[in-house]
Amino acid sequence: MKHILLIEDDVAFSEMLKHFLERHKYKVDLCYNINNASKLLNTKKYNLIFTDLRLPDGDGISLLKQVKQTDFKIPVVLMTSYAEVSTAVQAMKQGAFDYISKPFNPSEVLEVISNALEVKAINKESSSNEHKLKDKASAKRYITGISSASKTLNEYVDLVAPTDMSVLVTGESGTGKEVVAKSIHLKSARKNNPFVAVDCGAIPKEIASSEFFGHKKGSFTGAINDKTGHFESANSGTLFLDEVGNLSYENQIQLLRALQERKVKPIGSSDEIHVDIRLITATNEDLLLAVEKGDFREDLYHRLNEFSIKVPSLKERKDDLILYADFFLDKANNQLNKTITGFSKDVLDTFQNYHWPGNLRELSNVIKRATLLSQTDLITERDLPIELFKLQKQIIVENKFSTKENEKDLIISALQEVNNNKTQAAKLLNITRKTLYNKLKEYNLN
């Protein structure tokens, strides 16, 4: 039986959580402050520490440091409110395994605890199991997010991953469709087998057959060696076709035939190769519209779309922005050999007010550029590209020339851009907060 130390000063909540964990076969010791937790840690061995971030005599981060000094292998999971997510992210940099935001549902608690204990168990295994650790590291690079849009996305991923259904991933450019596809693969029974990603938009239609199905040496001019196609490379694993809407009509026919027959024939070969693949495709186009126009085969569309997942834009998951920003900052620090610790408050406000048309890809690029330019420990507004400030100026300029006819639309636009923050909206519109409230009442806007 796994032994958990639970530290939570809300007595009623902590008792409820303790009983819940005990019902799921965990042994739980409960304490309400860091002092008592330290005493227990000196006398008992625990498999996991589950602690609130805010405690009467300190915080979970100071306890985390103490634990990591004595036994680095004990996973520590933090409970936090949304307002403290930034602090929790910093805690993960200092060795916390994960955090979970309140309010949370029971299944989230069990999943986080199970993942933490599983990783600890893997860490104890021999180096022959190193590939499992790599899978865990890859899975950790997938940020689950705390926004409602992200939670829905994650529910769909968890639902479809264990199946062999073909999945069509849709969403705007830069939203991370390949990351979602890789997450589905890593949560499937095929996770230890190949994941082959193919950008259909980068394959000329003349050589698509060779790319997908392979060819034999001498089968055509330039075929100087045997080539293994993507289908064969992905055998027993997952084949991910990005921007599938870019395939020519002829290539669509070839793809459909391969999917129906589950076998491929390399160019120049008389032998067919049976393939067992799970297909995931992605597009930022409206494939149904392409079907209506006759640009995309309807039978292929239905073959690809056994289950569809829409990846939300960054604008739809603003609550996750700080998590992604911190992730991309860590990545940029590693790539550029820098040690930037975070963002100034003005930068975070600018990030929240910007509409991010390029989504996560744009956010990643902005942060990498800012990391390179920054001369201090924090990224400041002077490190950001001018494009991030143009919208605010545009709204202010439009406001100066606005008339009664477009005033309502301007207010709605401003509120949308700042995620309904009325103080920020008033600043963008260059009016007082009181005036904004009067306008909201006048136009019956909630």
Image (tube, rainbow, N blue to C red):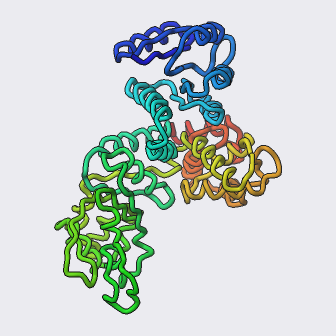
**Which residue appears at 49% of the width and 32% of the height?**
124
Q: Nearer the viewer, residue 133 or 23?
A: 133
Q: Position of residue 92 (x, y in %)?
A: 61, 34
Q: Position of residue 110 (x, y in %)?
A: 40, 25
**Furthest-left residue in view?**
261
Q: Position of residue 347 (x, y in %)?
A: 71, 46
Where residue 205 sits, quadrant-wise, is bottom left
**Furthest-bottom residue in view?**
221
Q: Nearer the viewer, residue 342 or 72?
A: 72
**Which residue appears at 24% of the width and 59% of the height?**
276
Residue 88 higher or lower than 195, as above or below: above
Where residue 395 sits, quadrant-wise, is bottom right
Residue 230 higher or lower than 167, as above or below: below
**Which residue appears at 55% of the width and 59% of the height?**
358
Residue 159 higher or lower than 231, as above or below: above
Where the N terminus falls, by quadrant? top left
Relative placement, left or right, of 181 versus 70 is left
